[in-house]
Image: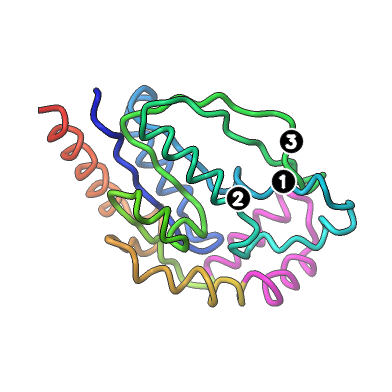
Amino acid sequence: MSEKPVVIGVAGGTGSGKTTVTRSIFQQFTDKTILMMEQDYYYKDQSHLPFEERLKTNYDHPLAFDNDLLMEHIQSLLNRESIEKPVYDYKLHTRSDEVILTESKDVIILEGIMVLEDERLRDLMDIKVFVDTDADVRIIRRLLRDINERGRTIDSVIDQYINVVRPMHLQFVEPTKRYADIIIPEGGQNHVAIDLMTTKIKTILDERAN
């Protein structure tokens, strides 16, 4: 297909289920058709900062992301060019030396808490999605994830949520809901919305193929 890829932005708060939604859509297509791009890979390189300074990074703030590089990479993918996707090292709190060679596909899903926050990214999207899940469900999901997968204590997760995650969500993430074409309540549990999204994507692809 020589047509420009379809770009879908999937935003939502931490623990909203946006990754589950993205993966559910991804599974409806072949690997040759669809590409997942996670905004989390595009945290800024902080190798110039001392480690103590890196520890202070607020990963829930728009300025934590290297959207310039993300924009450049999306533009390359739209031009059917491959990219070297960065990898972030959460232990060192900076970008890894490793990169992932990534080829363009017919459908690009850009997923992350802040993907609808930057107007430049929104302008590249054909469909903008916001996954909207109640705050109590989101904090429980984050609590379980950080304890089980990241070895965090309950106190540290709750402290971070109250002092950083929640205020950043209210200031930067929640307001981007107004830019969404589609709002999916309850995330990955909403199979009807996911089916509708999949059907819409297939329709766009069929139209572009003809």
Q: Give SS at disc 2.
A: loop
Crowdedness near tag 3: few (<14), some (14–19) or many (≥20) residues, C-alpha within 10 Å: some
Residue 167 or residue 16, whichever sits in front: 167
Location of residue 158 (image quadrant): bottom right
Residue topped by disc 1: 45
Q: Is residue 159 left or right of residue 70?
A: right
Main SS category, magenta section: helix
Residue 40 sits inside the magenta stretch: no
| Earlier residue among tags 2 and 1 | 1
Crowdedness near tag 2: few (<14), some (14–19) or many (≥20) residues, C-alpha within 10 Å: some
Q: Are marks 2 and 1 in contact (CB under 8 Å)?
A: yes
Residue 68 or residue 53, whichever sits in front: 68
Q: Is 146 placed above or below 206 here?
A: below
Residue 42 lies, in percent from the top left, at: 60, 45
Query: Distance from label 1 to label 3 (Cα)?
Result: 8 Å
Location of residue 103 (image quadrant): top left
Type of the residue with mark 3: Ser
Residue 144 marker: none
Residue 84 lies, in percent from the top left, at: 57, 29
Q: Please report the residue visible at 43 percent of the width from the left and 41 percent of the height from the top.
A: 23
Q: Is residue 148 left or right of residue 153?
A: left
Q: Is 102 placed above or below 201 here?
A: above
Query: Distance from label 2 to label 1 (Cα)?
Result: 8 Å
Residue topped by disc 3: 96
| Earlier residue among tags 2 and 3 | 2
Q: Is 140 placed above or below 24 here?
A: below
Residue topped by disc 2: 66
Range of residues picked out in magenta: 137-165
